[in-house]
Image (cartoon, rainbow, N blue to C red):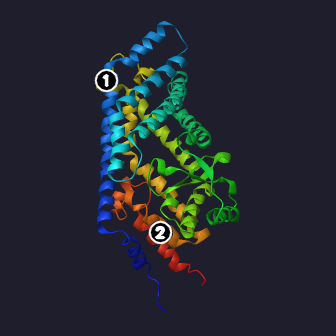
Amino acid sequence: MVLFDPAAATAAYLAQLPPEAHAKATAYTQGGHWLLLWGFLVSVLVSFLIVRSGVLVGLRRRMERRKPRPVLVSLAVGVVYLLIDGVLSLPWSAYAGWWRQKQYGLTSQAFGGWLGENAISLAISAVAFGLFLTALYALIRRVPRTWWLWSGGLTAVFITILMVLSPIYIEPIFNHYTPAPAGPVRDQVVAMAKANGIPADKIFVYNGSKQSNAYTANVSGLFGSARVAMSDTMFKQGADLAEVRGVVGHEMGHYAHYHSLWIAGVMSLLAIVSFFLVDRLFAPVCALLGGDTIKGLADPAGLPVLSVILAVLSLLGTPVTNSLIRIAESDADHYSLEHFNEPDGLSKALVKTIEYRAATPSRLEEVLFYDHPAVGARIRRAMDWKAAHPKAE
């Protein structure tokens, strides 16, 4: 009897890709780490330019002459700021979000298509976050000493609303979602859902290949709007039933364990910490950026200053937020293995994700930059599971 060797099996899976493919994946992944720094610098530069231009102060002054309600001033200034920021950041967004993906063969989308979707996304974000900022400034005006404490509840409400509405009203703007078509795949997915108390009508296929060639699936929504969605790239790349079971089982793990909900809760706690620091740092950062005409934290014309502080905190907090997501991803892998016992199916699917997420980073690199566990480690855990839970012949 030949004993199963998890280490050898893991090495065999990773060897399915040639060395040059692994090298390309490493170059893409490590280049993405630098994008965090450059993206941060771009956001600081854009905020600095907006502050120095005085455009938001000018808008606020013109509106104040007409004596509108402060809520309307906050909303107008917030929306204008978000639109200006999006336009000034467009060259960088085009490079990071389209051109670089095109370079590495991760998208087949034409630039015109990307640009149109980016414009739609900017408009939606301007409205949604404009409303959030309006509520935030209302808090600052009403409870100036403790507004940052209440911001956690506001953030939780905002994230929850977006999660509920996104699958119904936002995601269909960019992609077409249909129930999984009749056939062995649908039959298998429905059986998996029913066996684990997950609504069988919440499994969808979407035309993800429109934007990306990446092999992926996701869970989105909350409560009644939650659903599991598989990109059509899974089927175009020839996913077999074992892969479908492994991947969909992983996404069902997110659904069954309410990962979106608890991540939203933790993010709300982090928002309290972040806004507390904004409260303390706003004045010196405003002076540093030359915002002499900004009247203080309650002035919505100071949004670029607030943005710079949050950008710094976001960059420094990247390891924390990434670790939270990695924990959820590991738990979803375990759910898939425990409930569907498809270690090879899950491993086959993971190999196909290496092109956009290098398989064997150092532990430090994984902690600092990876929002998913390293593929090599995930496959090894699947092979360890296989060794401990052999299927009956």
Q: Is residue 302 above or below residue 309?
A: above
Q: Quadrant of the C terminus?
A: bottom right
- Residue 56 screen position, x and y as percent: 40, 19
Q: Identify which residue is drawn at 44% across, 40% down.
A: 113
- Residue 186 screen position, x and y as percent: 64, 62
The residue type indicated by label 2 comes to Lys
Dot 2 alpha-carbon crowd within 10 angstroms: few under 14, some 14 to 19, many 20 or more: many
109 horizontally vs 150: left or right: left
The residue type indicated by label 1 comes to Ala
Nearest-to-viewer mark from 1 and 2: 2
Q: Identify which residue is drawn at 31% across, 35% down.
A: 42
- Local SS, label 2: helix
Tag on residue 26? Answer: none
The count of marks equals 2
Dot 1 alpha-carbon crowd within 10 angstroms: few under 14, some 14 to 19, many 20 or more: few
- Residue 98 screen position, x and y as percent: 37, 44
Task: Report the residue marked by disc 2.
Answer: 348
Q: Is residue 194 above or below residue 220?
A: below
Label located before the other in sequence (1 or 2): 1
Q: Is residue 389 above or below residue 117?
A: below
Q: Identify which residue is drawn at 30% across, 22% down.
A: 290
Residue 199 visible from this viewpoint: no
Which of the two residues, 104 or 68, is positioned nearer the viewer here? 104
Q: Identify which residue is drawn at 46% across, 90% down.
A: 2
Task: Report the residue marked by disc 1.
Answer: 287
Q: Which residue lies most toward the top here?
A: 65
* Quarter of image, res 361: bottom left
- Local SS, label 1: helix
> Tags 1 and 2 in contact by the CB under 8 Å rule?
no
Which of the two residues, 108 or 81, is positioned nearer the viewer here? 108
Q: How many angstroms separate mark 1 from mark 2 (CA)? A: 54 Å
Q: Which residue lies most toward the bottom here?
A: 1
